[in-house]
Amino acid sequence: MSAAAVVGRWLLALLLVAAGVSHLTWGRRGYRIVVPDWATRLLRTDADTIVVVSGVVEIGLGAAVVALPRERRRVGAAIAAFFVVVFPGNVHQWRTGRSAPGLRTDRARLIRLFLQPLLVAWALTCTGRRTS
């Protein structure tokens, strides 16, 4: 693995852990606001539980990407899948114009949509999976 991939993994881990911590602490209320109603019905739970679980998953994935080097590719695939699974919530947030921490304008919410595929590619690339 190249030095860039190693740095990429550590930065990805940091991003995931920071996002996870924000879901569990200061950003928790703001993230509950953007959970789509259909997600609570589908998962048969409330928005707060979805926010907490997603935060725990983010922290776990962030830790796993650096702590489990033998499982690097599988963890990368899991991170990419996580980014895909949460994408409909990002679309919902953009369509409804709901604000969340760091996403208070329509422009920011729209740009966030275009960043999601880059996050998927980042997770796959820095863990040794091909994106092409």
Image (cartoon, rainbow, N blue to C red):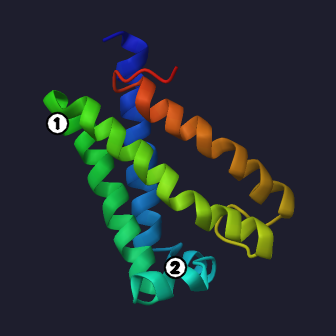
Q: Residue at x 49, y 50 (%)?
A: 83
Which quadrant does the N terminus fall into? Answer: top left
Q: Secondary structure at mark 1?
A: loop
Q: Residue at x 40, y 61 (%)?
A: 20
Q: Nearer the viewer, residue 27 or 62?
A: 62
Q: Residue at left 42%, top 48%?
A: 81
Circle 2 residues within 10 Å: few <14, some 14–19, many ≥20: some
Residue at which label 1 appears: 68
Q: Can you tell which mark lies on residue 39?
A: 2
Report helix, strand or loop for mark 2: helix
Q: Is residue 91 above or below residue 11?
A: below
Q: Position of residue 18 (x, y in %)?
A: 43, 54
Q: Earlier in the sequence, mark 2 or mark 1?
A: 2
**Residue 23 position within the rendered picture, expressed as x and y whole percent measured from the top left:** 45, 69
Which amino acid lies under the numbered mark 1 shown in the image of this protein?
A: Leu
Kindly identify the residue that appears in the image at 37 percent across and 12 percent down: 3
